[in-house]
Image (tube, grey):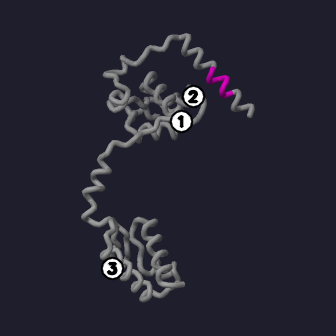
Amino acid sequence: MDNQKYKAIIESILFTMGASVELSKLAETIELDKKQTKQLLDELIEDYANAERGMAIMELDGAYQMCTKPEMYEYLIRIAKQPKHRALTDVLLETLSIIAYKQPITRVEIEKIRGVSCDHAVNKLLEYNLIQELGRLDAPGKPLLFGTTEEFLRSFGVHSIEELPILNPDQVEEFRQEAEEEMQVQLNI
């Protein structure tokens, strides 16, 4: 194998690992001795230093890590400050609706209404800061209680939960029947 191929392998390892990788581990992985591996790393460091690239390879106490060049930090900060686009799937919207209308509510109560596990949906909604933990229910197991956040209100353009549309009992019954029919179809598949 030629040096360019070895450098490409080292580069891909450092990029993928993200954290620093010890010289001995790199040498073992590419099946070269430490001296040869160090020589390849020095060449890679020089290649990155001389080129107009946003990345660099740095040595940290006998280990190597790929990182962003300091002069690129300004651009990283700009991109990090941009608002993140959140995609609310039907499952997330359904779970969020249940929480909004029934809060404070536990996972078990959400699952009872939905008929399926809600762990992923609740975790995503927590990550998006649309719901929050409100405390614990005074019951066996002390389950967490969930409710909506100020971010939820901002995102949906309401000032308080009282401004949410009121569901009439006929709609609620209709939704319940649709959910039961959908569950039956899924069970028969």
Identity, as a three-letter code, of the amino acid under mark 1: Cys
The spot of residue 86 in percent (x, y) is 42, 39
Give the secondary structure at mark 3: helix
Classify residue 122 as left or right of residue 158. right
**Marker disc for residue 118:** 1
The spot of residue 184 in percent (x, y) is 70, 27
Q: Residues within 10 Å of mark 2 (few under 14, many from 20)?
A: some
Identity, as a three-letter code, of the amino acid under mark 3: Glu
Residue at the (33%, 29%) spot, across then down: 154
Q: Residues within 10 Å of mark 1 (few under 14, many from 20)?
A: some
In the figure, residue 39 lies in which quadrant? Answer: bottom left
**Marker disc for residue 114:** 2
- Check disc 3 and report the residue beneath it: 46
Dot 1 or dot 3: first in sequence order is 3
Image quadrant occupied by the N terminus: bottom right
Circle nearer the viewer, 1 or 3: 3
Residue at the (37%, 43%) spot, across then down: 84
Q: Nearer the viewer, residue 83 or 113?
A: 83
Q: From what the image shows, is residue 172 above or below residue 33? A: above
Identity, as a three-letter code, of the amino acid under mark 2: Arg
Q: Nearer the viewer, residue 49 or 65?
A: 49
Give the secondary structure at mark 1: loop
Q: Main secondary structure of the magenta part?
A: helix
Cα separation, mark 1 vs mark 2, equals 8 Å
Q: Assess whether mark 2 and mark 1 are in contact (beta carbons under 8 angstroms).
A: yes
The spot of residue 2 in percent (x, y) is 51, 84
Q: From what the image shows, is residue 170 above or below residue 32? A: above
**Marker disc for residue 131:** none
Residue at the (74%, 34%) spot, across then down: 189
Circle nearer the viewer, 3 or 2: 3
Range of the magenta residues? 178-183
Q: Assess whether mark 3 and mark 1 are in contact (beta carbons under 8 angstroms).
A: no
